[in-house]
Amino acid sequence: MEKLLLSADGEILLYEVDKKILNNLDVLIEDFYKWKNTSYYDEQLFVKYLQQKFGDRAIIFKKNLGWLGNENLPKEYADIKWYNF
């Protein structure tokens, strides 16, 4: 499992994801935007999309890092891929 940070202009959430998700994140995000049936979406809807596509164990919530900006992200998370919706 790999680490991934997701947010939606708010709190940053740490997830563990299957390596194939991380390796194909850009394509999966594009597919997600085509899949969603609403103008309101956030990282939680993206997580549901990934769980439907790959199963519940493919993406697992680990920790809420809180409301941080790039400059306040702790160094231990600096090298983790981050996507903000």
Image: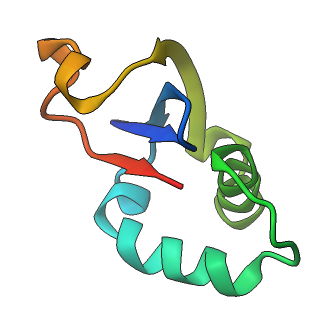
Q: Is residue 15 above or below residue 58?
A: above
Q: Nearer the viewer, residue 58 or 12?
A: 12
Q: Nearer the viewer, residue 10 or 23?
A: 10
| Apparent side of residue 44 relative to residue 38 in the rendered image (left or right) | left
Which x, y percent locates residue 48? 76, 52
Which x, y percent locates residue 82? 33, 44
Q: Nearer the viewer, residue 53 or 79?
A: 79
Q: Quadrant of residue 11?
A: top right
Q: Quadrant of residue 1?
A: top left
Residue at screen point 71% across, 53% down: 51
Quarter the C terminus occupies? bottom right
Q: Nearer the viewer, residue 81 or 24?
A: 81
Task: Say how the picture is coloured.
Answer: rainbow
Q: Is residue 17 above or below residue 75?
A: below
| Apparent side of residue 53 relative to residue 63 in the rendered image (left or right) | right
Q: Is residue 62 above or below residue 14?
A: above
Residue at screen point 80% across, 62% down: 40
Residue at screen point 53% across, 41% down: 9
For the image, the number of numbered tags is 0
Q: Is residue 16 above or below residue 20?
A: above
Q: Quadrant of residue 68?
A: top left
| Apparent side of residue 31 relative to residue 49 in the rendered image (left or right) | left
Which x, y percent locates residue 58? 58, 46
Residue at screen point 66% across, 56% down: 46
Furthest-right residue in this view: 37
